[in-house]
Amino acid sequence: MRQLQTMAAASLLFACFSLKAQPNCSYFLCLGDTAQYNACKLVEENIGGHYQFSREFHQLMDSAIAICPRFAYAYREKAAPYVKSGNFIQYMKNMELAVKHDPGTYLPIRASVRCKFFADHQGAIDDINLFLSTHKGDIPSSHNGTYHLLVVKALCYKNLNQPDTAIAILEKLFATEGYYLGGFDYLHLGVLYLETGQYEKALSTFESQKQQNNLAEHEYYWAVTLNKLKQKEEAKAHLAKARELLVPGTQMHDPYHEMIDQIYLVDIEKLEAQL
Amino acid sequence: MKYFPLLIFALLLSSCKGQEEVQKTEKKEYLRWVDDIAFDPLLDDSTFVSCNGEENVFQYFNDSKGMLYKGGKPLIDSAFAKNYHPKKSWDDSGLVRIRFIVNCKGQADRFRLLTSDFNYQPKEFDKRITNQLMEVTKSLDGWETMYLRETPVDYYQYLLFKIVDGQIINILP
């Protein structure tokens, strides 16, 4: 049992992002916001190794909120485990308050979570638009850093069956000077080209994905595209590569969630049967 | 500058007030972990056991491998495509979550339902929909054992359904 408890402590550190994301308490002091500073310090000094799901963690956040009901960070921290347990009601209840008190920080986070965890694509787009309507400066990433916020927006449009809008967003973003490409950006654009029948563009985009981040997924969709173009032998070669790459490290993976355009062995086997 | 002492005093006052509020804070009742599922003799199989005790049930992502289902998510999708049969007259929409425990033998129980509208407000869902979703979820038999440091453990898993007019639009996570 002791071993299990040790394992619990070790493995749960993986999921406990709170310390990394903790705000700089001195910032509140500089603003003269002592109540928020005190709430922040309380969390900073007592967070210890408390797991996000634990009673102690939530009681600590409640205490911080009691000191300063405007301390948005505590609401977000209370929301975090609920998204991981699929509890959309409690997540949104807490995030409403986090967003109310600090929309600049928490609207982008709520947007990407709505898209990823609740398939709330229109809600995510609304949050992003609201954020962009007042935000000046660099646009942040999704809640876990996987995507630029505008890629999240594009993926939401894809899920709302508006692929042309999604493509327009991605093409414009990728052409923006200084844009730092994400690990799956070209893959998603390539799949959108495939889904809209723009096969030649799809092929060149999968090539770009290969150069940037070699994955099983783009090889699979490459094979699908070639099959559409009746190039079965070449499709077989790419499908074989997809099978080879379908191992940890060269396939899409998120510990919490199935990713958009992620593939499985069963997908490869189905296409093999068609070729 | 002449207001500086006043500012300091105000800050101190604010600080003291904060401390007082901490002491007054009532401790809310929480379970060991939020969203833990306690045994309910009216709902749960009394023969189902969590192998390592209630205090050691993990979460589905704790091994960072994603959902542990034989064949992966496509097999869950196809189980619902095959066995969930909505009627055209069903018009209920919203989010449905079914959460449960998978024990170290890959058996599942303690199924619980959570439902809301698309504004994330709790609501009663059409039981014809939720009963079928529950039935199909309970019939899934591909759950795999989670190992942490080579020890088989129990874990919480959930399935979330986006329902529009009785039809399944998405199955997550």
Image: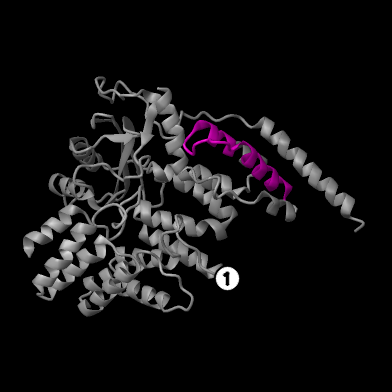
- Any magenta on residue B5? no
Residues shaded magenta: A33-62
Q: Is residue A147 visible?
A: yes
Is the magenta region chiefly helix, strand or loop?
A: helix
Q: Residue at x 38, y 57 (%)?
A: A115
Q: Residue at x 47, y 45 (%)?
A: A80
- Residue type, numbered disc 1: Lys
What is the x, y in percent for residue B136? 19, 39
What is the x, y in percent for residue B102? 28, 33
Q: Quarter holding the C terminus of chain A?
A: bottom left
Label 1 sits on a secondary structure element that is loop
Q: Residue at x 14, y 67 (%)?
A: A237
Q: State the image quarter where residue B107 is shown.
A: top left
Q: Is residue A103 left or right of residue A112?
A: right
Q: Pointer 1: residues within 10 angstroms few (<14), some, or many (20+)?
A: few
Q: Residue at x 19, y 37 (%)?
A: B135
Nearest the eye: A137 or A235: A235
Question: Which residue matches tag 1?
Answer: A136
Please name the colour scheme applied to the rendered image: one colour
What is the x, y in percent for residue A162? 30, 70
Q: Is residue A66 visible?
A: no
- Any magenta on residue A55? yes
Q: Chain of mark 1?
A: A
Nearest the eye: A123 or A62: A62
What is the x, y in percent for residue A85? 38, 41
Q: Is residue A132 left or right of residue B88?
A: right
